[in-house]
Amino acid sequence: MKIIVTSVLVDDQDKALDFYTNKLGFVKKTEIPMGASRWLTVVSPAAPDGVELLLEPDSHPAARPFKDALVRDGIPFTMFAVDDVQAEHDRLLALGVVFTQPPTNMGPVTTTVLDDTCGNLIQLVQMN
């Protein structure tokens, strides 16, 4: 068994696609119309046949209160690995990305947390 798709709940698929591709650097993999929304996935350019990230609408009644609670408590919804947290933080900061936690060394990892503009905090992690 292996993971092939995982989701991030977003408040606007177009805004999410823009952020995840033009800021974070993912590439669009799949876009299939499904009524009012789309099956819309992005992948890492380093692994185009790897795990897909579904930009899933947060229209379910439980989604927004859940997301709001995580953000209020400063808890990231998911985590992405990077080779150099400081360099990625600096690159994204220059693109206007808002961070809620600066790069922080935590022993075996260095992390930073950003706001994805779609209602989520996302953690970037570098293995030290």
Image: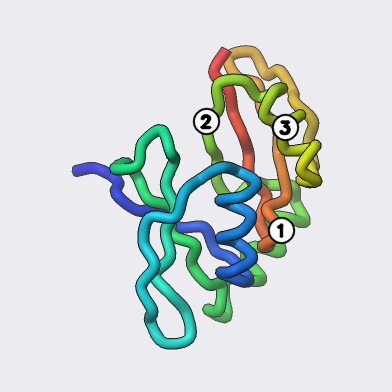
* Res 69 → quadrant: bottom right
Q: Characterize the local packing of mark 2: few (<14), some (14-19) or many (20 or more) Cα atoms within 10 angstroms.
A: few
Distance between the alpha carbons at the discs numbered 3 and 1:
17 Å
**Nearest to viewer (mark 3 / mark 1):** 3
SS assignment at label 3? helix
The picture places residue 34, in percent across and down from the top left corner, at 38, 81
Residue at image x 55%, y 79%? 59
Q: Is residue 6 left or right of residue 24?
A: left
Residue at image x 41%, y 33%? 46
The relative height of residue 44 versus residue 109 in the rendered view (above or below) is below
The relative height of residue 25 versus residue 39 in the rendered view (above or below) is above
* Res 93 → quadrant: top right
Amino acid at dot 3: Arg
Quadrant in the picture for the N terminus: top left
Residues under numbered marks 1 and 2 in contact, where contact means CB atoms less than 8 Å apart:
no
* Res 70 → quadrant: bottom right
The picture places residue 21, in percent across and down from the top left corner, at 56, 50
Q: Residue furthest bottom?
A: 35
Distance between the alpha carbons at the discs numbered 2 and 3:
15 Å
Q: Which mark is residue 126?
A: none
**Residue beneath label 2, please?**
81
The picture places residue 91, in percent across and down from the top left corner, at 72, 32
Q: Characterize the local packing of mark 3: few (<14), some (14-19) or many (20 or more) Cα atoms within 10 angstroms.
A: some
- Mark closer to the chain start, 1 or 2: 2
Q: Which mark is residue 91?
A: 3
Q: Nearer the viewer, residue 114 or 43?
A: 43
SS assignment at label 1? loop
**Residue beneath label 1, please?**
117
